[in-house]
C-alpha cells in the first residue's frame, strides 16, 4: 500500500469515510505538500469523523481552506515552538455564565478564579474579571512578552526582555506566518525605540512613541484592574490562594497524554475544596466548544461533566475534530457522543433535514444535487462576522425549537446520563475511564 503521506487527500477521505470528494473540494488541498504536523492533524480528524459517523458529504470548501491554510499557522512550529498566544473578546462568555450559574458553599473571603494560559492580549481574562466583579481573578501564562511594539497601522510584534523578536501579529489576520520582511521591519523599529525605555518598574507599564509607532514595556499591566492581576508562571509553580475555579481552555490539547495528566494533577492541587477545573477547546468565536468539568473532593479531582455546544453536531468548520496530539480524550468522547446522536434515527433524520432547510433560509449554504454543501455567493463574499451572526441565530432558533433537548434525549436512549446544562450545552456524566483526570 502507498504510504499515507504520499497519497492524495481524496483517497484518504474515501478510505476513512467511504466516499470521495468532488474535484472542486479535493483539488484545493495537496496532502503530500502540507507539513507533517498538518498531515497528522488531518489523519486524526478523519479517524474522529469515522468514529462519529460523519459522512464525507459534510466536507465543504471552508473546511478545505482551514486545513490547507489556517491549520498550519496555528501550530507551535509557526510560532517559534510556542503555543499560539492568541485569544479573542467574548470567546469564553458562555463559560463565564456557566460559573455564574453554579451554587457555591458559603465561606469567608473573596473567591478566586484562575485563567491558565490566558494569552495576549488577555481579552478573555478581562471579560471574566468584568463579569465577576466580586471575585479575585488571576490571568496566568508561562510567558508574557516584555515588550509589545505597535506600528502606525496597529500591527504589533512581541519581544522578550533581551530584545529578541518573538512573533508578529497583523491587525486584520488572527493567524499569520512570521514573514521575514515584517520581522526585519519590526526589529528595525525596536532598535530605534528601545533606547528610550527606562524599564525601571516591573509592576507597571511604560510607553514610548515616535512617528506613530509605539513601544510598550510590561504591556500586560495595562489590562489589570481592581480584581484582576496577571502572573507569569508555569502551572506546576503557581503560588496563589486556592481557587474556586480554574479555567484552562485551548492549552492541554498541545501536550501529550502523560503531560496532560500531570498538568491536571497540578491544577487540582491549586483548587479549593469543592472547586472546579474547566478545560477543553473552543473556536476563537466561542463556537464548537467541548469541555470537561472536574470537581475537587476529599480524594482529589474527578470528572463530573463533559459538555459540548450543539453546533458540533452539524459543523461548517473543523472545530469538532481539531487535535494537536494523539489520544485526545475530549475529542474522542465528543466523537462517540455525536456518533450516538447521529445513530438515533428518531432524532437525527428530522434534525439533519431541518438544519439543511435553515442554512438555506439564512442564506448560508445549500445542499447540492451532489449531496455536498455549497456556500451561497453572499456567504463566500461577506465578512466572517456576518456569517457568524447568521450561524449563531440559526443555532439559537434550533435551541428555542427544542432540538438541543432532542439531542439530550437521544443520548439518554443510548444509555448516557445526559442533560442540558445551565448554558444550553449538551452534557453527560463521563463514562468510567473516558476522561481520566
Image (cartoon, rainbow, N blue to C red):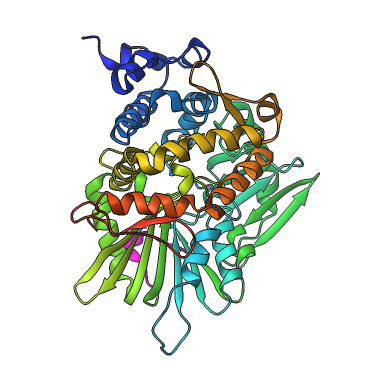
Q: Residue at x 49, y 10 (%)?
A: 23
**Magenta residues?**
230-239
Can you see residue 218? Answer: no
Of the pair 177 and 242, the residue shown nearer to us: 242
Q: How far across and how far down the image is residue 401, in percent?
A: 54, 52
Q: Is residue 428 left or right of residue 33?
A: left
Q: Position of residue 133 (x, y in %)?
A: 58, 76
Task: Identify which residue, 138 or 50, lies in the foreground.
Answer: 50
Q: Is residue 371 left or right of residue 200?
A: left
Q: Quadrant of residue 339?
A: top left
* Outermost right residue: 211
**From the viewer's perspective, is residue 127 above or below residue 328?**
below
Residue 7 location (% of width, % of height): 33, 12
Rendered residue at 48%/20% (across/down): 371
The answer to whether residue 304 is above or below residue 436 is below
- Quadrant holding the N terminus: top left
Q: Residue at x 54, y 40 (%)?
A: 167
Of 3 and 387, nearer the camera is: 387
Q: Which residue occupies the foreground of this view, 195 or 392?
A: 392
Position of 355 compared to 32: left or right? right
Amino acid at each position: 500500500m502507498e504510504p499515507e503521506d504520499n497519497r492524495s487527500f481524496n483517497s484518504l477521505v474515501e478510505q476513512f469515510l467511504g466516499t470521495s470528494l468532488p474535484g472542486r473540494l479535493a483539488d484545493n488541498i495537496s496532502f503530500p505538500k502540507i507539513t507533517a504536523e498538518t498531515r497528522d492533524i488531518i489523519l486524526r480528524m478523519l479517524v474522529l469523523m469515522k468514529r462519529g459517523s460523519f459522512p464525507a458529504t459534510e466536507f465543504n470548501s471552508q473546511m478545505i481552506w482551514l486545513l490547507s491554510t489556517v491549520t498550519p499557522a496555528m501550530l507551535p512550529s509557526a510560532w517559534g515552538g510556542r503555543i499560539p498566544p492568541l485569544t479573542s473578546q467574548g470567546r469564553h462568555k458562555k463559560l463565564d455564565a456557566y460559573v455564574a450559574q453554579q451554587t457555591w458553599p458559603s465561606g469567608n473571603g473573596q473567591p478566586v478564579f484562575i485563567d491558565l494560559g490566558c494569552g495576549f492580549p488577555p481579552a478573555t481574562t478581562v471579560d471574566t474579571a468584568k463579569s465577576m466583579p466580586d471575585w479575585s481573578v488571576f490571568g496566568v501564562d508561562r510567558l508574557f512578552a516584555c515588550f509589545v511594539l505597535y506600528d502606525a497601522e496597529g500591527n504589533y510584534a512581541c519581544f522578550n526582555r533581551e530584545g529578541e523578536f518573538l512573533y508578529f501579529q497583523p491587525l486584520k489576520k488572527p493567524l499569520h506566518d512570521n514573514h521575514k520582511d515584517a520581522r526585519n521591519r519590526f526589529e528595525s523599529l525596536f532598535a530605534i525605540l528601545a533606547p528610550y525605555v527606562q524599564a525601571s518598574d516591573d509592576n507597571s507599564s511604560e510607553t514610548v512613541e515616535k512617528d506613530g509607532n509605539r513601544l510598550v514595556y510590561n504591556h500586560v499591566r495595562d489590562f489589570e484592574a481592581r480584581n484582576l492581576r496577571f502572573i507569569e508562571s508555569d502551572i506546576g509553580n503557581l503560588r496563589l490562594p486556592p481557587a474556586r475555579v480554574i479555567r484552562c481552555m485551548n492549552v492541554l490539547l498541545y501536550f501529550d497524554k502523560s503531560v496532560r495528566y500531570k498538568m491536571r494533577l497540578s491544577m487540582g492541587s491549586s483548587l479549593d475544596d469543592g472547586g472546579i477545573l474547566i478545560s477543553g477547546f473552543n473556536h476563537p468565536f466561542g463556537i464548537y466548544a467541548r469541555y470537561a468539568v472536574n470537581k475537587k473532593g476529599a480524594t482529589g479531582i474527578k470528572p463530573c461533566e463533559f459538555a459540548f455546544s450543539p453546533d458540533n453536531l452539524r459543523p461548517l468548520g473543523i472545530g469538532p475534530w481539531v487535535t494537536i496530539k494523539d489520544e485526545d480524550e475530549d475529542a474522542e468522547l465528543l466523537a462517540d457522543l455525536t456518533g450516538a446522536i447521529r445513530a438515533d434515527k428518531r432524532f437525527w433524520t428530522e434534525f439533519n433535514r431541518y438544519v439543511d432547510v435553515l442554512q438555506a433560509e439564512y442564506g448560508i449554504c445549500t445542499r447540492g444535487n451532489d449531496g455536498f454543501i455549497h456556500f451561497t455567493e453572499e456567504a463566500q463574499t461577506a465578512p466572517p462576522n456576518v456569517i457568524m451572526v447568521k450561524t449563531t441565530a440559526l443555532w439559537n432558533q434550533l435551541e428555542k425549537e427544542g432540538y438541543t433537548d432532542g439531542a439530550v434525549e437521544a443520548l439518554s436512549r443510548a444509555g448516557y446520563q445526559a442533560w442540558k446544562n445551565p448554558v444550553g450545552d449538551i452534557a453527560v456524566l463521563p463514562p468510567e475511564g473516558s476522561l481520566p483526570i
